[in-house]
Amino acid sequence: MPSLKSPKGRINTMFKCGFYESDITPKLGFCMPGQFNDRPSKSVKDNLFAHAYAFTDGVKTVIMISLDTIVIDARDVKRMRKGINSVTGVSCENIYIAAIHSHTAGPVSTLYNTERNEEYIEFLIGRVVDAGIVAFNRMAPAKLGYASTDVRGVAFNRRWVMSDGRVQTNPRPDSDDIVLPADVTDPQLIVVRIDNEDGSPMGVITNFALHLDCVGGDSFSADYPGVIRNIIKSKYGYDCGFMFLNGCCGNINHIDFVNAKRRTYKEIGEILAASVIDLFDKIETSADISVDVDREFITAEIRLPTAEEIANPTFHHLIVREMKKALEMGGGEIECEIMSIALGDLAFTGLPGEMFCIFGHMVKNGSPYKMNIVSELTNAQLGYVYTREAKRLGGYESTASTYTRLNEEAGYLMVGAAIKNLRKMIKR
């Protein structure tokens, strides 16, 4: 494992960490966003949590939070940051909040026909603030290390070029018209181990790029990360902290279209958990960790559907419905926050949309840090962020609608801002 010393070689003896999780499971009957129509919840497969991780090198303090939600709106991030800051004093600029993108979670935003539920939002904000404060108060001397491995056979492209040249999202898996995948995947599983001063496990952070729409139905669930969490806690103890950060997976899911197989959320969770444990048990940790954080803002243009696109007979009527709504919403610009954190030579980058996988690769390839975790839907939700090629080829994710709002340049601007952050931090 590479050295975790800061790039400038500054020796740190004040590294402290703390974990905490708050239950954010909604009331039964609340709708679950993620489909085109409402899905009132009827049961609970597994509880949902806000997972908080606080850390400091004695100079800079950061709080990271991973939410078992489908997205998180920027206006709610602002309130969560303010609530945590009012008690801990941690700068709002140093609070990183990411949604894991579970499609079987609470109504945190108006998505398609599912309305944002203000009662649940108030409950959620309070629980998130609690989690951040407790994690901060639990900070104690700690050590950190990381490792990664490739896990294949669980994440697949969901956009395919068909025999007629069109791109289709989630085609029939046994279709003879499937030609080749339209995009790339990212098999890298990253595991961060945090130990107590005596070397016992304090917590684990995992990062993998795979859409969380593997459960379906009408029961609340954190999807496959919930399975990983439960396995980790069974092995290392309930007090072992856990955090999952979803990678760039706007065009990646759990269906093997070539072999016409569909992985279940339990299978995926068990496969990834086994790899997490294998890596975790081999990671060496160090207390010599420096902390840094930076933000950059870009302005992205809103893209509106054209009359010709709305009239396209190949679009499903529900997509056309959302295109017409988007036209009524109007155009303009949106400010996008890109946030980066460094823990020694490990970097985290948060991007605010449901990112196509290639953008994660771009950040990793352009970063000066030795290991890079990229999380989507961080500090805001700005819908699908797709490529220029995806706009040309078409398909559900790159069709302007109420959820696909930004134009095809947004992802490249976000990557540029992320790399700018990372290069600034490593020079300090």
Image (spheres, rainbow, N blue to C red):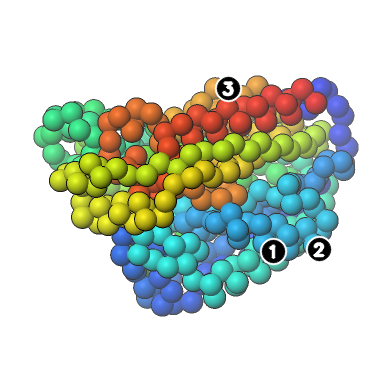
Q: Report if the CB atoms under discs 2 and 1 are less than 8 Å apart.
A: yes
- For label 1, the residue is 129
Q: Report if the CB atoms under discs 1 and 3 are less than 8 Å apart.
A: no
Circle 1 sits in a helix, a strand or a loop, which is it? helix
- 122 versus 36 height, above or below: below
- For label 3, the residue is 366
Displayed quadrant of residue 112: bottom left
Circle 2 sits in a helix, a strand or a loop, which is it? helix
In this picture, residue 182 sits left or right of residue 427: left
Which of the two residues, 148 or 82, is positioned nearer the viewer here? 82
Q: Quadrant of the C terminus?
A: top right
Q: Amino acid at mark 3?
A: Gly
Circle 3 sits in a helix, a strand or a loop, which is it? helix
On the image, the x and y values in percent for residue 343 come to: 73, 35
- For label 2, the residue is 87
Question: Spatial distance from mark 1 to mark 3, Cα to Cα?
Answer: 34 Å
Residue shown at the point (73%, 38%) measured from the top left: 293
Residue shown at the point (69%, 64%) measured from the top left: 129
